[in-house]
């Protein structure tokens, strides 16, 4: 329920705590927060991870991996739909965060989206 474990299967967000390993196909590509930089151009962090640092989003850090992974999946989704991110899209990210950095999270998502390929 907390979505801290949010990862990707084939580029789309999922919650590993609610999916049995046996339900994955051998061809499924699972990406965790640690593998995210490998999906970005050049060395270094993924653009959304860098945006998180640039906007000083993290407080306690508990929700950050899930937030970043949900944000990357959101950006990919809206791009597939050939549209811009809307406020209601940002509202739909329901990962638990109690630190109150919502405005910085939104700013980081918008910055990171501009730098994602």
Image: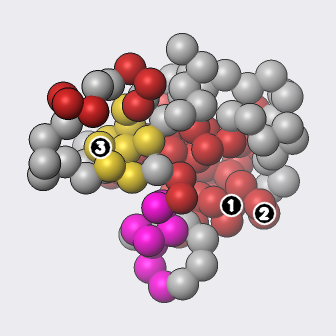
- Callouts 1 and 2 close, C-beta under 8 Å: yes
Please state, as top left, top right, bottom left or bottom right, where the N terminus lies in the image: top right
Could you say whether the residue bearing mark 2 is in a helix, strand or loop?
A: helix
**Marks 1/2: CA–CA distance:** 5 Å
Q: Is residue 111 left or right of residue 25?
A: right
The quadrant of the image that shows the C terminus is bottom left
Magenta stretch, main secondary structure, is helix
Indicate the position of residue 61 as horizontal and vertical percent values: 78, 41
| Residue 62 figure quarter | top right
Residue 110: x percent and y percent? Answer: 60, 52
Residue shown at 51% from the left, 45% from the top: 69
Within 10 Å of disc 1 (Cα), the crowding (few <14, some 14-19, many 20+) is many
Q: Which residue is mark 1?
A: 51
Q: Is residue 65 above or below residue 51?
A: above
How far is disc 3 from disc 1 in space, using C-alphas?
A: 23 Å
Secondary structure under tag 1 reads helix
The segment highlighted magenta reads: 35-42
State yes or no: discs 3 and 2 in contact (Cβ < 8 Å): no
| Numbered marks: total | 3
For marks 3 and 2, give the CA distance: 27 Å
The disc placed on residue 33 is none
Looking at the image, is 97 positioned above or below residue 28?
Answer: above
Instruction: Report the residue at 84% width, 28% height from top.
Output: 100
Within 10 Å of disc 2 (Cα), the crowding (few <14, some 14-19, many 20+) is some
x and y percentages locating residue 5 in the rendered image: 53, 34
For disc 3, the marked residue is 9
Q: Which residue is mark 2?
A: 54
**The stretch drawn in magenta includes residue 10:** no
Q: Is residue 102 above or below residue 82?
A: above
Please identify the residue farthest to the bottom as the structure is shown: 42
Label 3 or label 2, whichever comes before in sequence order? 3
């Amino acid at each position: 329920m907390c979505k801290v474990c949010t990862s990707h299967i084939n580029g789309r967000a999922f919650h590993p705590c609610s999916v049995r390993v046996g339900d994955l196909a051998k061809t499924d590509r699972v990406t965790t927060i640690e593998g995210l930089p490998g999906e970005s151009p050049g060395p270094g962090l993924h653009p959304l991870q860098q945006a998180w640092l640039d906007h000083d989003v993290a407080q306690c850090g508990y929700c950050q991996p899930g937030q970043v992974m949900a944000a990357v999946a959101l950006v990919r989704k809206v791009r597939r739909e050939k549209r811009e991110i809307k406020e209601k899209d940002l509202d739909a990210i329901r990962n638990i965060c109690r630190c109150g950095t919502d405005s910085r999270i939104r700013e980081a998502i918008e910055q990171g989206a501009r730098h994602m390929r």
